[in-house]
Structure formats: structure tokens, C-alpha cells
Amino acid sequence: MTKTNINHNPEKIYFMGDLHYQHKNVISLDSRPFEDLQAMEEYIDAELSTKLDSDCILFDLGDMFFGTRENRFQKLLSSIPCPIYKIFGNHDKQDFFLKHYDNFKGFYDILSLMIGEDYKITLSHYPILDFPYMYHGGLALFGHTHGHLDKFVDNIPNLMLDIGFSSQFSKSRGTFIHSLPSIIDEFRRKTGGKDFKTWAAEEYHGERSLWN
């Protein structure tokens, strides 16, 4: 696991996952509202180019692509006007991404992200049930499950969230690309507005804090 500190305007920090660019079958598998692959890719390109600007930073939580063709790879990257931190997913061909290293700020399997003094967030493609700082108000973002764990996650105390394209969170927000404030608001819904450290202390009764 890699740790990195980010000192950046929270309004300009974004997250996404499970785009499955070039994946025709994901439209039916996930019940995505597109007639065909071209329509889905045009929507993805438009969202990225209009929601982001050069002052943003973007964290991709895996499965950006399903297949990887050079022209389609370049087309998607040309829609993203800001630095990208890449978490590898099971469908990402790592060798291909590494050939395009200059397009990314870094590559990771799991990234422990420190945002200022306020937020400690574990980023991974796969959900992690016990993650760093969990018992002290830490958060976790993941993809991979395409919303199938949403009900389970909503009923456990862990402050973790599927932010992938087909998650309930993305569907409720009407977009697959999420700013840090929108994600924090979702976690606050779960904690009833309590700050995350207080929530964690109450949920875990303090004794498990020895584990971290």
C-alpha cells in the first residue's frame, strides 16, 4: 500500500471507477441507459470534458477500460484535462498503461490518501472490509462490485462506499464522476451528520482502536 498526501482544493478533487470503456456487454449487464457502445462512450467523454478542468485532480478506481485499443485509449485520455492517479482494476491491462506513464501521476493497487488534516481515505478497486484508520474515522472508496454490495455496505458501520459507474451512489447523483465534497456529504448521511472520528468511536466502542 502506498501513502500520499494531497493538499488541494477539495472542490477540485474527483473520483470515478468502472467506466468499462469499450465494453459493449456492460450496457446490458449493468442496465446502463445507452442504445449502443458509441452512445455510452460519447456520454463518458462529454462528462469528463465538462466536469473537469486543468485545476482538478482525478482518482480512477479501476476498470477504466475493458479492452485496450490505442486509438480508443487516446480518445478517452484526451477528454480528461487534468492529472490522473490510477488504481488498477482487474480489467486494466497494466503493461498498456505503463507505456503511457506520462499521462498519469502514478499507478497503484491500493492508495492511502491523506487530504490535508481532515480526511484519510483508502482507495482500491476491490472493497476492503478492514482498512487503515477505519476505527479513527477513516474512509474507503472502491469499485468493482457494480452496486451489488450497496445494501450490505449501507448496513455496516464501516465508512466505505462504492463510487463506480453503476453503483447506487452514482445513479442517485446522475453522474459517474464525483467531487470530494459530494462523497463527504454521502458519508455524513450515514453518520447522521456526526464527524467521522466521533462516529467511529461510538460504533467501535474504542477497544478496537488498538488494531490501528
Image (spheres, grey):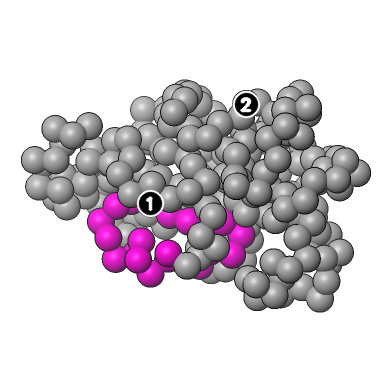
Q: Which residues are magenta?
A: 149-168
Q: Is residue 45 visible?
A: yes
Q: Badge 2: how crowded within 10 Å, few (<14), some, or many (20+)?
A: some
Q: Which residue is mark 1?
A: 160
The amino acid marked with disc number 2 is Gly
Instruction: Give whichever of 150, 196 is nearer the camera.
Output: 150
**Where 170 falls versus 143 (above or below)?**
below
Instruction: Give whichever of 96, 155 is nearer the camera.
Output: 96
68 drawn magenta: no
Q: Residue at x 68, y 35 (%)?
A: 94
**Where 156 falls versus 102 (above or below)?**
below
Tags 2 and 1 in contact by the CB under 8 Å rule?
Answer: no
Q: Which residue is mark 2?
A: 106
Q: Which quadrant: the N terminus?
A: top left
Q: Residue at x 82, y 43 (%)?
A: 73
At which x and y percent is residue 177?
A: 62, 52
Helix, strand or loop status at disc 1: strand
Left or right relative to 81: residue 165: left
Left or right relative to 80: residue 118: left
Gap between marks 2 and 1, in whole Å?
23 Å
Instruction: Give whichever of 191, 35 is nearer the camera.
Output: 35
The amino acid marked with disc number 1 is Met
154 drawn magenta: yes
